[in-house]
Every structure is written in C-alpha cells, then in structure tokens.
Amino acid sequence: MDLKRWFYRDGRPNRVARVLDRATAGLYARGVAPNYLVTLRVRGRRTGKPVAVPLVMTVIDGERYLVSMLGEGSNWVRNVRAAAGEVTIRHGRDERVLLEEVVPRQRAPVLKEYLRRAPNARAHLPVAEDAPLVEFERVASRFPVFRVVSRAQP
C-alpha cells in the first residue's frame, strides 16, 4: 500500500495524517501556498466547533469547486451537508461562501481538472489523470463536488 493511501485508509485520516492536515490547513489559511490551496472551515455536525480542512480548489471557466478525494464518507462532506453548505474558505483572508453540491452527471469535467491540480488525489480516485471523460463519469457519483458561491460579507 502506498503512503498516500495509508494516510487515509478506509476513507479516514490516521493519526499522522491528522497532524499533517492541521499543519497544512494552517499554512493554507495564512496564504503561504499557491492560491488554489485553501482551508475550509465548517461547523462540526456533532460538536458545533469549527473544523479546518486543507483542500485543493479547482477552477473551470471562472467557477470554483471543491472535491472530496475520499468520497462520500469524508467527514468534511458530512459537515458541509449538515451546515447547509455555509462555510468559510481561507487563503490569507476569510471568505464566507456557500457550497452547492454538483449533481453526479455534471462532475466529470471537474474531477478530471481536479486530478490535474491535485496530484496527491491520484492515489484515491480510481481513474488515470489522462483518461477520457467517460471514465470520470463512471466514478462521479462516488466523489462529491461542490461549487463555491461567494456570499456578501457582513
């Protein structure tokens, strides 16, 4: 088993991955990384406390997207759904946004671009980066995609 899959065995981060994710989320939040590396902050569905997760943002035709490389069972996905999509994205500054889930039949192009942008995700998505779009369509229902919609700042 390769290291990238070991970090997230069974779709959940192990202890080492949690430590690395916390550190990475801190760096992304400060803006000390390319602008497509962001920290998602969402209220935990059980505790109500903010949860921070480092993510790779994909941009297609000016629209921003977040993808769950670990699929439906990802904790951040369940928290986003419980929060009705109301989250904060941070890369140097906070931006309150609404995440709208993309229906599976429209996810394939986003997944393909996501694999190009997020090389570490290749260990989790069972499609080659250069595969035809039809291959991404076959797995699209297993990997949630959210469109990022800007909200007015208070």
Image (cartoon, rainbow, N blue to C red):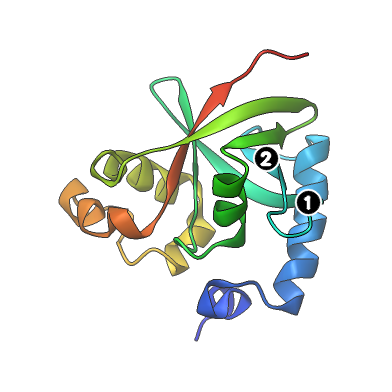
Horizontal and vertical percent for residue 93?
A: 80, 26
Q: How many marks?
A: 2
**Between marks 1 and 2, how big is the CA–CA gap?**
21 Å
Mark 2 neighbour class, 10 Å CA radius: few under 14, some 14 to 19, many 20 or more: many
Residue at screen point 75% across, 50% down: 52
User: Are dots 1 and 2 in contact, CB under 8 Å?
Assistant: no
Residue nearer the viewer, 103 or 22: 103
Residue at screen point 52% across, 81% down: 2
Q: Nearer the viewer, mark 1 or mark 2?
A: 1
Horizontal and vertical percent for residue 84?
A: 57, 38
Q: State the SS at label 1.
A: loop
Look at label 2 and name its amino acid: Val
Look at label 1 and name its amino acid: Gly
Residue nearer the viewer, 37 or 46: 46
Of the image marks 1 and 2, the number of the one nearer the N terminus: 2
Horizontal and vertical percent for residue 45?
A: 68, 54
Q: Is residue 82 above or below residue 33?
A: below
Pick the quarter of the image with the C terminus. Answer: top right
Q: Quadrant of residue 125?
A: bottom left
Residue at screen point 72% across, 53% down: 44
Q: Quadrant of residue 138?
A: bottom left
Residue pointed to by mark 1:
48
